[in-house]
Amino acid sequence: MIMLVIALFLVTIITRILPAFFVGGLQFPQWLITLLNYIPYAALGVLIFPGLLTAVETPMQGILGGLFAMVLAIFRVPLFFVVFGTIIFVYFLI
């Protein structure tokens, strides 16, 4: 078991920390930097979308709640109020 933990530790170090040393000195084109900035949002969307459809009684309530949260986020409402406001919004839909 200890060997497995050490092996997983080494794999993590090699794939996450070592590239940071090599990539730090490279200059990327602006379009690539812009593209890479959207990756966390895309990953978060992939994780959240199935929950929107299954967390409430009907998928339409989840979609409306997601759209409401998007509108609040576009207006740069703080995250706590986006989450809390969306919960209240979906609660009144039911």
Image (cartoon, rainbow, N blue to C red):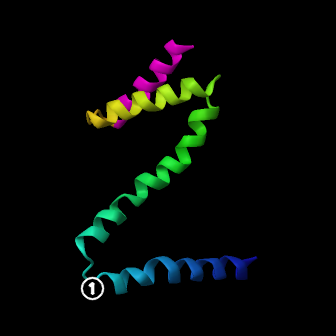
Residue closest to the eye, 24 or 7: 24
Q: Residue 11: x and y, percent?
A: 58, 81
**Residue 68 vertical position relative to residue 25 in the rendered view, above or below:** above
Please give left or right for residue 38 compared with residue 13 in the image.
left
Residue at figure coordinates x 52%, y 16% from the top left = 91
**Residue 82 vertical position relative to residue 40 in the rendered view, above or below:** above
Q: Residues within 10 Å of mark 1 (few under 14, many from 20)?
A: few
Image quarter hosting the N terminus: bottom right
Q: Residue 66: x and y, percent?
A: 47, 32
Q: Residue 67: x and y, percent?
A: 43, 30
**Residue 4 vertical position relative to residue 66 in the rendered view, above or below:** below
Residue span colored magenta: 79-94
Q: Residue type at mark 1? A: Gly
Q: Residue 27: x and y, percent?
A: 24, 81
Looking at the image, the residue that sits furthest to the right is 1
Magenta stretch mostly in which secondary structure? Answer: helix
User: Is residue 44 located in the magenta-colored stretch of the structure?
Assistant: no
